[in-house]
Image: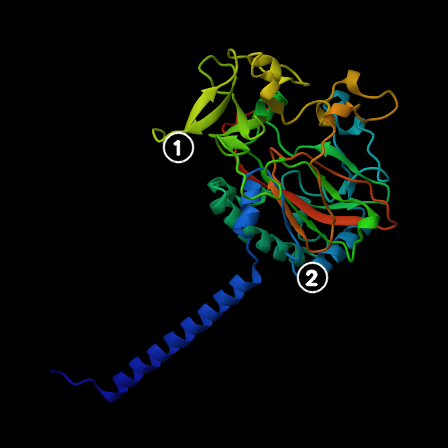
Amino acid sequence: MKTLSPRFLSLVVALFSWAEKDASLFASALSSSTKATPTISKADMDKIANGGVAVLPNFVPQDLVERMRTDAKQLKKKGAFRPDGLSNYAKGNSDQQGFSKANDRQTFRGIGNGIQQSWYVSDLGDYQTRLEFDNLLAQLRKQLAADLGRPTLLGHERRHEITYNWYEPGAKLGRHLDEHHEETKGPKGWRYPSRRSVTWLVYLNENWKESEGGALLCHPRSAHEGDTSSFVEGGPIGSHEGNLQVGWMDDHTPVYLDAFRESGMTALYSCKASSENNDGYEKIYWSKHDFDVPAQPIDFRVFLPKKVQPRFEQISTASKDPRFANASTLTPSSNSVQVPPAMVDTNNLEVTPSGGTLVLFDSVTLPHSVLEVTGDRQRIAATGWFHEDSQFAFDGIA
C-alpha cells in the first residue's frame, strides 16, 4: 500500500478545516438572515385564507421604518406624489375625477418610464432603503405562495405593485375592493397577464394615536374574523381555477364567475369536496343559465333561481364600491355614493396605522376603506399588491 506523505495529509487537514470554517460561517449567515426575516404564524395565515385580516405589529424593524418615512418625506418635497383617489368609472378618465391633495390619498407614482414603477427609479430618493424593504417583501411573498397554495405569486418581481401612500389631515379613502373579476371590467379587463392576489400595507407613522384618525376600516367575514376555528367551506377564497370570486352563498361558501363556458358566456358556481378531481373540488353551478355579464353596475342575483337569491351576498355592488356606481347613483354635489342604511356593516375591524405594523388580506374578497385623518400631521404608509397569474390574457388590447 502506498504511504501518504505528511505534506499531503497536512493539505487534506487544512482543506477540511477551511471547509468546516466556511460551512460554519455560511450556516451562521443563513441563521442570521432567517432570524432577520419575520414569518407569519399559522393563525394569521388562516385568517387570510378564510377572508379575514392579518395584523402583525412591529413586523418591520424600526430602523427601516424610520428610513422609509424619511424617504417618503423627501420625495414628497420633490413633488413625487400625486392625488390618487378611487376612480368612478362612470365619470371618465383620471383627469375628470376631481381628486385633490386635501381630500384624497396621494401616491408615489407616475415618475417611471411608463413600464418601470417609480419605486424602482434609482436616482429618486433613498433607493437602497427601498430595495432593502423589497427584499423583506420577497421573503414574505415566498411564504404566502407556499402557505396559501398560490404558486404564481413567485412570478416576476417587478409585476408586483409597490408605492408610498400619503394622507394630509382631512383626507380619507372610500370603501372598495382591490381586485375584481376581469369580466366585470369590460374587454380591457383581460389585457393583463396577472392580477392582484394579496394586499399588503406597512405603516410608517411615528407614535400614531387612535385619536389622530386614519384607521384602516375592514369588513371581514363575520364567521371568520377573530375566530380561527371557523373556515370557509366549498373552495378557496378569492379564486378557483383562475375564476375570481364574486360573492358568498350562505355567508361562508365562495361563489365564482366562470367566464370560459363552452357557450362563450359566463355562469355562477361554487365548489364541494370531491376525491375524483385533482384539486379536490367539484363545481356546482347556481345560475339558471349561462349569461353575458352586463355593464356596471352589475347585480348577479338576477341570474340565480329565486329560491336561492336570499342566500346570496355579492361582494362588490354599486352601493358598496363607489367605482361601480353609475351616474344616477352619484349625489349631485359630490363624488360620493348614496349608501342605503341596510348596507351598513356591523362586523368591522379598525386597524390603527402604527409604525412597523404589517396588514395582509385577500385582494378580491375584503372590502375596506381609510377613515379621515383627524389629527394635524400626515399619515404615511408603504402599500402594494402581490400578483398571481390571470386565467387568460388577450394580446393587443389597448
Residue in the foreground of this view, choosing between 340 and 370: 340
Q: In this view, does 100 lie above or below 186?
A: below
Task: Please report the residue visible at 69 percent of the width from the left and 63 percent of the height from the top.
Answer: 63
Residue 35 appears left or right of 104: left
Residue that mark 1 sits on: 280
Residue 37 appears left or right of 99: left
Tell whether label 2 touches label 1 (CB within 8 Å): no
Q: What residue type is labelled 2?
A: Gln
Secondary element type, mark 1: loop
For the C terminus, the image quarter is top right
Task: Please report the residue visible at 27 percent of the width from the left and 87 percent of the height from the top.
Answer: 7
In the rendered image, residue 43, in percent from the top left (x then y), is placed at: 55, 49
Marks counted in the figure total 2
Say which of marks 1 and 2 sits in front: 1
Q: Distance between the residues labelled 1 and 2?
A: 43 Å
In the rendered image, residue 4, in percent from the top left (x then y), is placed at: 20, 84
Residue that mark 2 sits on: 62
Task: Please report the residue visible at 60 percent of the width from the left and 36 percent of the height from the top.
Answer: 223
Residue 12 appears left or right of 220: left
Secondary element type, mark 2: helix
